[in-house]
Image (spheres, grey):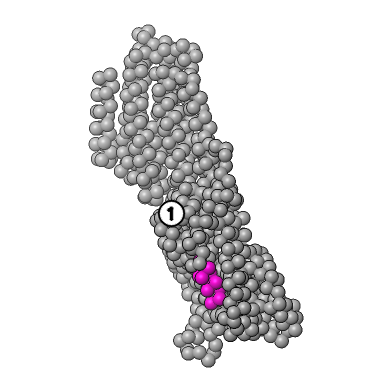
Amino acid sequence: MDIFNVITLFGGLAMFLYGMRLMGDSLKQSSSGAMKQVLSKITDNLFKSFLLGMLLTALIQSSTATIVITSGLVAAGLIPLKQSVGIIIGANVGTTITGQIIRLLDIGDSSAVWLQLFKPATLAPIALIAGIIMIMAGKKSKTQLVGSIAIGFGILFVGLINMTDAVSGLANSSAFINLFTNLDRSPILGYLAGALVAFILQSSSATIGILQALSTSGQLTFKGIYAVLVGVYLGDCITTAIVCTIGQKEDGKRVGIIHVLFNISETILVLLGVNLLHRFGVLDGIWDKTIGSGGIANTNTIYNLVSALLLFPFAMKFEKLSRVIVKDDQGKQSEAKEKLAQLNPNFYSTPAIAFNSCYEAMKTMYEMAFTNIQRAYSLLNEYSEESFAEICDREDEIDILADGISQYLAGLSSYIKEDLHVSILTQYYRDVTEFERLGDHALNIAEAAKNIKEKEISLSADAHKELAVLQDLLEKILSESRQAFYYRDEEAALNIEPLEQVVDDLIATIEANHLKRMSSGQCSAVSGGLLLDLLSNYERISDICSNIGFSILARVHPDLMQTEHSYMSLLHQGNDESFNEAYQNARKQYYEMLENN
């Protein structure tokens, strides 16, 4: 084997790894929404969790991806830790599907014509041709994603063919023969070699694929590679455990630990089982026989499947042991930091799950702002230093959430490809700023209340009554905004704008009434300036709600983004009958309240 064969071998390995990654990433992107829904709606049935983990890993060709996503969902509280155990066991079995695909190397030229269609040398060009046609001719992103999957599949097989060609001369290499003779004599060396290569490549499938390519030399035997296969599991799970610990909460870290514990148990079980079977002569028929690509694939599948079945009754022991290893954090985190801890960068490659994490954090942010506005109202009637301090603390939390969510969305943006995800990203970018502004105006109202208390300023009874009507209307608008955002409720979003127009009318009326009171000496200039400042903040709150409502409508109808100004102008000019009717009804209701107070 000369330097050119080595270059071909590593070039083939690079293509194999890239093809597997391209295929897996495209599959994850095209099915990210489904993955999120399936993984987050698991029942309490451990066996169903096992099946889901197996099927999802077979689909996306990566046990690491399945387990990392599961870790994030557990950390986010979307699935309980105990259910992750079944997914982890299933993922170990599902990852063996790659080896079963690679075993197509065993198909020879003497096979039937229809069977030869499945040879890598035939499948690779077919997949590449189909993929490039879909990418170049497809107008829809889904079609192009399918094309990318096909391209990845084709590149994977081209890399595999190159690796196979590069090692074809090893059958006559004395150094190669000596290497695997030593592996025959030292299972520990084989175990460590498998673990090291899997850790470096960060893929058990790729490591086993290399073994399958090497098997074409005819020098691999069962006794030489059985320990290598077992070592692969340990090397792969260590990588996954490291990824699961980065920026995760305790339960998220425990998912990685459970994966390590399961794989160590599987290692012990397989090594003991194989050696016991060999001692009793059960494996004599295959022990010294050469093993091909299909034999390696079958051995790998049997190892994982049998281990899963035997260890399944002890599944919950892994969960309990993980809690012993990873202790609960005794320090109480703020609510904002708890929510931000759930914004896991590992979800970037599955945008639907990443958006769900943002959505949960933004709901918390909105509730904080809404609560602060209500508390600020109450301070105008009865000032409390304790309530003011709570509003200030909540405002800090809102700012922390705004910064964290914005940074997360910025990191996520480079992974966004689909039009739907673009519209969600646009909405969330816009809304997180609006939610932060709601908190700012709540603090402004609270500071006005503090000013009234400290400077002993008094607002007239009429002013208090008018503000109460305005606050009632603002609570209605804020409730509609919450409904619109939480449930992407188009009807609630449409309800906001007529109410916002009534707010503007009420504020104009209250300002006029106040000027009359000032001119008659009922109100002082100081109290007048403070009241106008309050009204300005109330008006800004209604404007923000209007923006939130429009962002929901623009997500449902993306074309509105290009015509926002004209859309709003047409509504306020009275060109929409539904708007007119809702506006007139709300105006009548709140002006009656204003007159009766």
Name the quarter where the N terminus is drawn: bottom right
- Report if residue 251 is visible in the image: yes
Name the quarter where the C terminus is drawn: top left
What residue is rendered at 35% in x and 36% in y?
479
User: Is residue 449 or residue 524 the one in the foreground?
Assistant: 449
User: Is residue 246 or residue 560 the one in the foreground?
Assistant: 246
What residue is rendered at 44% in x and 18% in y?
383
What residue is rendered at 51% in x and 25% in y?
389
* Residue at the outermost bottom position: 110
| Residue 580 x/y as whole percent | 26, 36
Q: Is residue 267 above or below residue 475?
A: below
Q: Is residue 323 above or below residue 283?
A: above
What residue is rendered at 51% in x and 64% in y?
311
Q: Quadrant of residue 551?
A: top left
* Residue at the outermost top position: 521
| Residue 82 x/y as whole percent | 48, 54
Which stretch is magenta?
Answer: 298-308
| Residue 153 x/y as whole percent | 52, 72
Residue marked by disc 1: 40
| Residue 150 x/y as whole percent | 50, 71
Q: Quadrant of residue 594?
A: top left
SS of the residue at dot 1? Answer: helix
* Residue at the outermost front position: 280
Q: Residues within 10 Å of mark 1 (few under 14, many from 20)?
A: some
- Looking at the rendered structure, the number of numbered marks drawn on it comes to 1
- Report if residue 8 is visible in the image: no
Q: Main secondary structure of the magenta part?
A: helix
Q: Is residue 234 above or below residue 358?
A: below
307 left or right, relative to 539: right
Q: Is residue 378 magenta?
A: no
What amino acid is found at the position of numbered circle 1 in the picture? Ser
Q: Is residue 211 above or below residue 516?
A: below
